[in-house]
Image: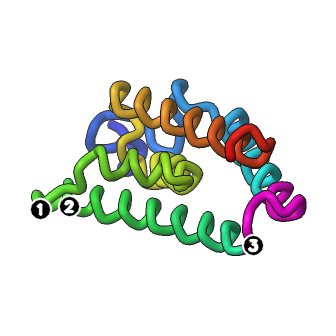
Amino acid sequence: MQKQGTVSRRGRPRGKRSASAPAAPALLLMLGWAALLAWGVWADRLPLWSLGAAVVINLLNFVTYAMDKSAAQSGRWRTPEKHLHLLSLAGGWPGAWCAQQWLRHKSSKQEFRAVYWATVVLHCAALAAWVGGWLP
């Protein structure tokens, strides 16, 4: 007989990270992203308000994931995946990653995660090009 609470409703062990979502690379990427934002502000390549905007977009994305998970569990209207991806592309990808890990929402859909990581790469490349002076 199994102890209660050791296995989720989907039969997955609770409290263990999936092998497809190692935390260290994502956390290092977030650190590099934050450093790039800070450097961009320090070097006057980004306005100071961009730091506040980054916080807001990440909180908004996390809350959007939470609301979508709640809607999924109760059979209500869902947030379209393209809206989640647009928020990630706009800079809310760290909030999305946190939501995927902590809320376990959209963390096992491989097609969704592939598009998510594409938005991360596109956003980081655009930010680096802007801060680096390669964009007008």
* Helix, strand or loop for disc 1: loop
Question: Label 1: few (<14), some or many (≥20) within 10 Å?
Answer: few
* Distance from Cα at disc 3 to Cα at disc 1: 39 Å
Identified at 50% across, 53% down, the residue is: 90
| Mark closer to the chain start, 3 or 2 | 3
Question: Label 3: few (<14), some or many (≥20) within 10 Å?
Answer: some
Q: Circle 1 is placed at which residue position?
A: 76
Percent across and percent down for residue 55 are 61, 68
Instruction: State which quadrant residue 87 falls in.
Output: bottom left
Depth check: give the residue in front, 105 or 95: 95
Q: Circle 2 is placed at which residue position?
A: 71
Q: Tell us which disc is closer to us: 3 or 2.
A: 3
Q: Give the range drawn in magenta.
A: 38-48
Please say whether residue 47 is one of the residues in the magenta stretch. Answer: yes
Amino acid type shown at disc 3: Leu
Identified at 70% across, 46% down, the residue is: 130
Instruction: State which quadrant residue 68 falls in.
Output: bottom left
Specify the quadrant that holds the N terminus.
top left
Q: Do the residues labelled 1 and 2 touch (CB within 8 Å)?
A: yes
Instruction: State which quadrant residue 17 falls in.
Output: top right
Q: Circle 3 is placed at which residue position?
A: 48
Percent across and percent down for residue 29 are 71, 40
| Mark closer to the chain start, 3 or 1 | 3
Amino acid type shown at disc 2: Ala
Label disc, if present, on residue 52 of the rendered structure: none
Depth check: give the residue in front, 10 or 2: 10
Amino acid type shown at disc 1: Arg
Q: Tell us which disc is closer to us: 3 or 1.
A: 3
Identified at 36% across, 63% down, the residue is: 64
Please say whether residue 1 is one of the residues in the magenta stretch. Answer: no
